[in-house]
Image: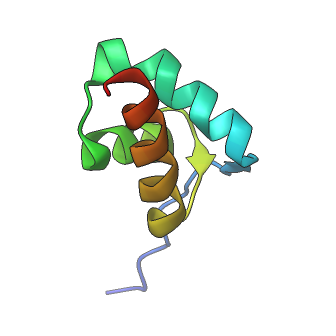
Amino acid sequence: MGARPKPSRPPQRRVDDAAVKDLILALAPAVGWRNSDMLAHLRHVAGVSCEQRRFATLFRAVKAEVCP
């Protein structure tokens, strides 16, 4: 049996903090206010690259502004 090729992944784009916050606000009605669901959606559907800890910090900040 031959070596299996690596699955291809579409390239993810890097965005700044302001863009991540804007995406969180835009996607919240469809995805909901769960950190893990939102991050998975950003990574796998929107193709956005964001480190988990950085995303969690930004997510909490946006949620605190919207849902005090």
Q: How far across and how far down the image is residue 37, in percent?
A: 27, 41
Q: Quadrant of the C terminus?
A: top left
Q: Vertical placement of 57 versus 42: above or below?
A: below
Viewer-closest of 8 and 32 = 32
Query: Which residue occupies 33% across, 12% down?
Result: 29
Residue 58 image position (x, y, % from top left)? 52, 48
The structure residue drawn at horizontal position 45% and vertical position 29%, both measured from the top left corner, is 65
Q: Is residue 13 left or right of residue 45?
A: right
Residue toward you, 29 or 9: 29
Instruction: Report the front residue among 24 and 4.
Output: 24
Identify which residue is drawn at 60% across, 44% down: 48
Q: Residue at x 31, y 87 (%)?
A: 1
Residue 8 image position (x, y, % from top left): 55, 57
Q: Residue farthest to the top? A: 29
Q: Is residue 68 left or right of residue 27?
A: left
**Colour mapping used in the image:** rainbow
Quarter of the rendering containing residue 54: bottom right
- At which x and y percent is residue 53? 46, 68
Image position of 67 with respect to 15: above or below: above
Question: How many marks can you see?
Answer: 0
